[in-house]
Amino acid sequence: MKKARIAVLVSGGGTNLQALIDAEKKGILKSGTISLVVASNPNAFALERAAIAGIPCDIAWKKVLGSQEAFEDKILELIEVYKIDLIVLAGFMAILSERFTSRFPKRIINVHPSLIPSFCGKGFYGLRVHEAALEYGVKVTGATVHFVNEIPDGGEILMQKAVSIRPDDTPETLQKRVMRLAEWKILPMAVEQVSAEIVK
Ligand code: GAR
């Protein structure tokens, strides 16, 4: 059976990448195969997870590449070389411009740690999202998987899962619970759904 070739773009710990690797092993992700991991910096622990899983990986580091254009060109080149069908942003903290995103309509997906349209868009990433949810005092938060377009966190929603906030939550405890109960579940499911569409 033909499988969609997936590139996962990462910046940090890579627990969402790990969830995808595990889902492929378990057969939850069966219509796609993780064929490339690209990190936005050389210190991303996600690179070690990719290496352990035997997945080819590379680094696109804006700091050494010098410009947004050169940074995006490096990713574009890798996408071409590895014949990638689907790009997954899994804790990818760098911005991709419209010049990049417009080339891949409904072929880039992102996981965001809140229920979009709350706590999303420019400046809302990582722990900051959970700090904002706790500051606001919402009682329910969660995670969203969506297609990526030119609007930050503004593309069509694919899946969402809600997570209750506890009175004693800190940004760190909330982040962990949202990952465990929501992100690591809906990201592999959404990646399978889009991969199945691609190979159909
Ligand atoms: C995850 O919570 C992910 O949703 C978030 O960063 C974390 C990365 O963790 N992404 C964003 O905030 C993007 N806007 P990971 O590296 O362990 O997957």
Image: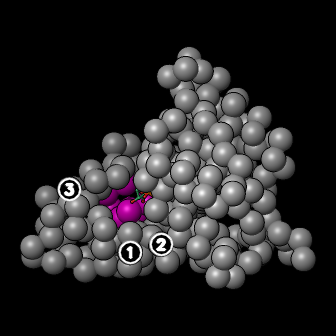
Q: Quickly name the residue at label 2.
A: 184
Query: Which amino acid, mark 2?
Result: Trp
Judged by depth in the image, the label closer to the viewer, 3 or 1, is 1
| Residues marked 3 and 1 touching at CB (< 8 Å) | no
Q: Which residues are magenta?
A: 112-120
Secondary structure mostly seen in the magenta stretch: loop
Q: Secondary structure at mark 1?
A: helix
Q: Residue furthest left?
A: 168
- Mark 2 vs 3, N-terminal side: 3
Q: Secondary structure at mark 2?
A: helix
Q: Quickly name the residue at label 1.
A: 180
Judged by depth in the image, the label closer to the viewer, 2 or 3, is 2
Q: Is residue 117 visible?
A: yes
Q: Is residue 48 left or right of residue 76?
A: left
**Residue 185 on the magenta span:** no
Residue 4, above or below 26: above
